[in-house]
Amino acid sequence: MSRWKCGIEGCDGRFEDVESAVIHQTVEHERHECKVCGTIVPEGYFAIRHAFDEHTRAEFVRAYDADSSAVRIREDVKDAVEADADLNSVVETLREQGAL
């Protein structure tokens, strides 16, 4: 069974490795507009990374009407991806595909 799933609502994509999941999210899904600052970012992991690297948790909670559980879920996703992924390879692949 595939270890990684897309995680974007309505998508049943499953992947053997996290890099494929992140590339799928970036290439196959609509971009996300950050509700804090309006920046357009790829949906999924990159949107989570943007929210938590560029903004405070409090800004995220206010802008997305989220609670502490929603924050923890996204922090866990971010931590899991960053612990397992070769993000340099992901970025290189996405640049080669013209997706970044």
Image (cartoon, rainbow, N blue to C red):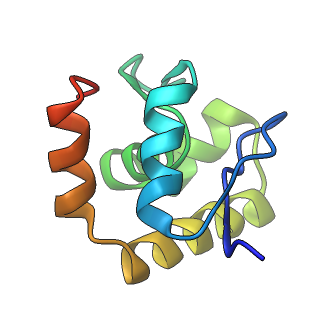
Residue at image position (51%, 41%) is 24
Please tell me whether residue 75 is drawn above or below residue 51 in the rendered image.
Answer: below
Using the image as rendered, state which of residue 82 and residue 69 is in the foreground.
Answer: 82
Task: Report x, y in % for residue 33.
Answer: 49, 19
Residue at image position (15%, 34%) is 96
Quarter in which the N terminus is drawn: bottom right
Please tell me whether residue 73 is drawn above or below residue 42 in the rendered image.
Answer: below
Using the image as rendered, state which of residue 70 and residue 100 is in the foreground.
Answer: 100
Task: Report x, y in % for residue 78.
Answer: 49, 66
In the picture, measured across the screen, residue 10 lies left or right of residue 40, that is right
Using the image as rendered, state which of residue 93 and residue 35 is in the foreground.
Answer: 93
Please tell me whether residue 2 is drawn above or below residue 49 in the rendered image.
Answer: below
Residue at image position (43%, 54%) is 52
Q: Residue furthest bottom?
A: 83
Residue at image position (76%, 36%) is 65
Task: Please count the marks in the image.
Answer: 0
In the picture, measured across the screen, residue 18 lies left or right of residue 69, that is left
Task: Report x, y in % for residue 21.
Answer: 53, 54
Task: Report x, y in % for residue 69.
Answer: 79, 65
In the picture, measured across the screen, residue 7 lies left or right of residue 59, that is right
Quarter in which the C terminus is drawn: top left
Using the image as rendered, state which of residue 34 and residue 2 is in the foreground.
Answer: 2
